[in-house]
Amino acid sequence: IITGRHTDRKQSGAEDCQHFYCIFLFSYSLLERNKGFWAVLLIMVSGLTKIYGIFSLALLVCYPRFWRNAGYVVLTGGVLFLLPALKLPLSGLIPYYGEWLNALAVHQSDQTYESLFYAQPLAEWLLPNFRVLQIGSLAVLALLFLVSRRKWDTAAFRAQALGILMGW
């Protein structure tokens, strides 16, 4: 998957991630049709391209054959992890991923996103606590997901969980 920026117009975060939304939907439809390997492969490719994709792995617990799908995660993750070794020496792989993780942690952007975090007078408190709020909201979503265990086998719950992942 090749991601790029449009230089002729301002691009919002939602427009920037449209192909990931498509991957979320396509992997969901593959899981619904019991095509676990292909769904996991898509999720892993999207997760190694942009971090949002990794969150789709949470849906695997809602499907039968969880351990088989978890095996696909290990298999495809290992292959995709080693794929840069086709161009890099093996000794350069760990520093390469270290730079990648650093880029994720810093996440510099030339865009100003319009969101609740920039609303006055809330911005003075929200912006410095952005990461804590982001991790906290993810923890609350994870907790709500876990307490809804009885609903995991229903297609409606899985579709709702996917919608929340895509919106988050």
Image (cartoon, rainbow, N blue to C red):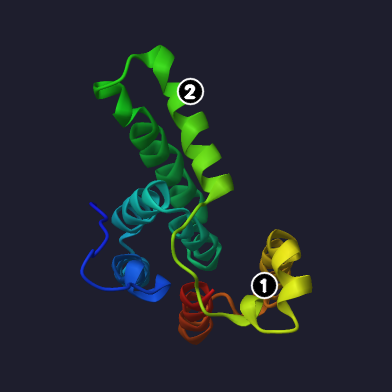
Say what amino acid the circle numbered 1 marks: Leu
Q: Residues within 10 Å of mark 2 (few under 14, many from 20)?
A: few
Q: Is residue 37 above or below residue 148?
A: above
Q: Residues within 10 Å of mark 1 (few under 14, many from 20)?
A: some
Residue at coordinates 49% horizontally, 61% vertically from top-left? 60
Q: Secondary structure at mark 2?
A: helix
Q: Is residue 111 above or below residue 162?
A: above
20 to the left or right of 107: left
Question: Residue 153: where, in percent of width, then height?
Answer: 53, 76
Q: Toward which corner of the image does residue 138 lie, by quadrant?
A: bottom right
Residue at coordinates 51% horizontally, 82% vertically from top-left? 154
Residue at coordinates 23% horizontally, 65% vertically from top-left? 6
Say what amino acid the circle numbered 2 marks: Pro
Q: How many marks?
A: 2
57 to the left or right of 151: left
Relative to the observer, which residue lies in front, 127 or 138? 127
Q: Is residue 148 above or below residue 31?
A: below
85 to the left or right of 69: left
Q: CA distance from mark 1 to mark 2?
A: 33 Å
Question: Residue 105: where, in percent of width, then height?
Answer: 58, 46
Viewport quadrant of the C terminus: bottom right
Question: Residue 21: where, in percent of width, then height?
Answer: 35, 71
Which numbered disc covers residue 95? 2
| First in residue order: circle 1 vs circle 2 | 2
10 to the left or right of 117: left
> Of tags 1 and 2, which is closer to the observer?
2
Which residue matches tag 1?
141
Q: Secondary structure at mark 1?
A: helix
Which numbered disc covers residue 78? none
Q: Spot the residue most to the right.
A: 125
* Cβ atoms at labels 1 and 2 below 8 Å apart: no
